Image: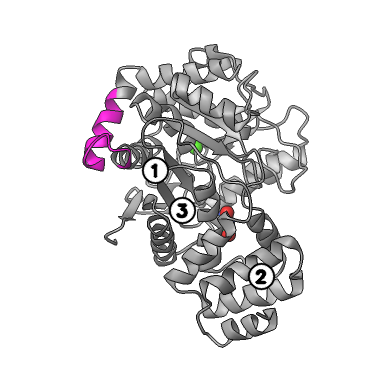
């Protein structure tokens, strides 16, 4: 096989065989295929795409490029959840204890990554004392003992994705359905769950802006999961405005605790029930996701979900009193009210702009070595569909103690610009656009 010929083959729109795809991925990871050939191939894939079989072969070749984790030792069906990423998405924090409280084992491997706020790990680490560094053996032992644990990624999972993603990032080849689907699914398959629920975001704060693109990606990932023998369902959801009210690390932990108490924002609770309902369904606990929602709602109402969170925090050396006393989370005293200048109904609250504002405050990482502040972020007091009048507080900024006036003024301006107003009443946006399972949409 010659790499040149394979690049040409894809460039001309032909289908690569499994052996050819394995040869390319293996060669890239062992260094025998240089970046310039891989980037030409990635560009050819961007233009010509890949069929379902090629996409599955690509994904499996990536999975096999490094370590894989086995969760076989844990009894029961292990269901993992993945979100393609949005702004202020607090669902994972809520779902981990909520689903575990329903008796589904949750062995969560989580990342940090770049973004407007930290990843699930960063958020949990804002709880004083909370530790996420553990071996896979520790993770399994914790799940066997209390049914739930969250660990930072250990081992050398999917090195092919680390290399390929870095290459795509600088060669304008991130934006390809098979490459995105393969990238996401290879990491999920390597992490060992038996079944997967995917939250594919569409809208302003998502990397896919259109609903159609999101459904296409959802379909591709469901094909891969099921093709790999892991039952997979994708839910396509709205990320035009941030989810819930909080955008920030400790602020989102607080929001998760409120949601587990039954006092959370309605959109966040609803999405957790929808995704969690599917997780229960794939775990074989109930026959359909609607019934799952009712089961989970009860676990919130009777306190079981919050108790499970407390148990997990304690088991990972965190201060579990935070579930009763939110003041134990890191806070800033530097809070600024953002006031509406106009009046009307909020037709849009642009997630992307709010995300950038949160990052400007220090809630996220622009670069791998950016220093984040767990206490900072934004609380959105008003959301799409709400009516506001001039002078009313629409959001509260939680800034670093030492934040200067210029920074505050620019964040204030950004947040106000994220709110678009209309003079007539506006409906609350649809939260869930639909789902994709083995049988299709
Ligand atoms: N997220 C990933 O993990 N990979 C992609 O290619 C895009 C988004
Ligand atoms: Ca939120």
Q: Is residue 375 visible?
A: yes
- Mark 2 highlights which residue? 172
- Mark 2, secondary structure of its residue: loop
Residue 303, located in which quarter of the rendered image?
Answer: top left
Tag 2 and tag 3, C-beta contact below 8 Å: no
Between the residue at mark 2 and the residue at mark 1, the CA separation in whole angstroms equals 41 Å
In the image, residue 296 lies in the stretch drawn in magenta: yes
Between the residue at mark 3 and the residue at mark 1, the CA separation in whole angstroms equals 18 Å
- Quadrant of ligand 1: it is bottom right
Look at the picture and state if 253 lies above or below 270.
Answer: above
In primary-sequence order, the first of circles 2 and 1 is: 2
Identify the main secondary structure in magenta.
Answer: helix
In the image, residue 248 lies in the stretch drawn in magenta: no
Circle 2 packing at 10 Å, graded few (<14), some (14-19), many (20+), is few
Magenta stretch, residue numbers: 282-298
Circle 1 packing at 10 Å, graded few (<14), some (14-19), many (20+), is some
Residue 195, located in which quarter of the rendered image?
Answer: top left
- Mark 3 highlights which residue? 240
Foreground mark, 3 or 1? 3
Circle 3 packing at 10 Å, graded few (<14), some (14-19), many (20+), is many
- Mark 1, secondary structure of its residue: strand
**At x 28% / y 38%, what residue is drawn?**
284
In which quadrant of the rendered image does the C terminus lie?
bottom left
- Mark 3, secondary structure of its residue: loop
Q: Position of residue 6 (x, y in %)?
A: 62, 81
Q: Which mark is residue 387?
A: 1
**At x 74% / y 41%, what residue is drawn?**
407
């Amino acid at each position: 096989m010659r790499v040149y010929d394979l690049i040409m083959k894809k460039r001309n729109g032909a289908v690569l065989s499994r052996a050819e795809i394995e040869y390319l991925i293996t060669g890239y990871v062992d260094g025998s295929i240089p970046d310039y050939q891989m980037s030409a191939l990635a560009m050819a894939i961007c233009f010509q795409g890949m069929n379902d079989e090629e996409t599955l072969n690509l994904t499996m070749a990536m999975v096999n490029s490094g370590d894989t984790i086995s969760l076989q030792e844990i009894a029961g069906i292990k269901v993992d959840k993945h979100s393609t990423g949005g702004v202020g998405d607090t669902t994972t924090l809520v779902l981990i204890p909520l689903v575990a409280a329903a008796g589904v084992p949750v062995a969560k491997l989580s990342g940090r990554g770049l973004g407007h706020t930290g990843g699930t790990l960063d958020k949990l680490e804002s709880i004083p004392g909370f530790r996420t560094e553990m071996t896979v053996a520790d993770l399994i032992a914790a799940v066997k003992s209390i049914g739930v644990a969250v660990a930072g990624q250990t081992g050398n999972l999917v090195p092919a994705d680390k290399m390929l993603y870095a290459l795509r990032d600088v060669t304008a080849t991130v934006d390809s359905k098979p490459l995105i689907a393969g990238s996401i699914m290879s990491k999920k398959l390597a992490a060992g769950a038996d079944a997967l629920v995917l939250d594919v975001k569409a809208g302003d704060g998502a990397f896919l802006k259109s609903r159609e693109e999101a459904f296409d990606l959802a379909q591709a990932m469901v094909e891969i999961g099921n093709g790999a023998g892991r039952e997979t369902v994708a839910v396509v959801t709205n990320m035009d405005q941030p989810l819930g009210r909080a955008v920030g690390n400790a602020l989102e932990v607080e929001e998760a605790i409120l949601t587990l108490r039954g006092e959370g924002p309605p959109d966040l609770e609803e999405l957790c029930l929808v995704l969690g309902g599917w997780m229960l369904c794939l775990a074989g606990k109930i026959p359909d996701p609607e019934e799952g929602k009712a089961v989970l709602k009860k676990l919130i109402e009777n306190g079981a979900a919050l108790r499970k969170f407390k148990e997990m925090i304690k088991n990972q050396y965190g201060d579990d009193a935070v579930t009763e006393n939110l003041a134990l989370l890191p806070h800033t005293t530097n809070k600024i009210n953002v006031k509406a200048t106009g009046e009307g109904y909020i037709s849009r609250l642009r997630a992307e702009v709010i995300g950038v504002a949160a990052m400007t405050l220090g809630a996220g990482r622009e670069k791998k070595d950016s220093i984040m502040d767990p206490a900072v972020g934004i609380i959105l007091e008003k959301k799409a569909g709400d009516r506001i009048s001039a002078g009313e507080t629409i959001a509260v900024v939680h800034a670093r103690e030492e934040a200067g006036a210029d920074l505050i003024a620019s964040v204030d301006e950004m947040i106000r610009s994220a709110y678009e107003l209309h003079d007539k009443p506006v409906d609350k946006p649809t939260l869930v656009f639909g789902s994709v399972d083995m049988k299709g949409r």
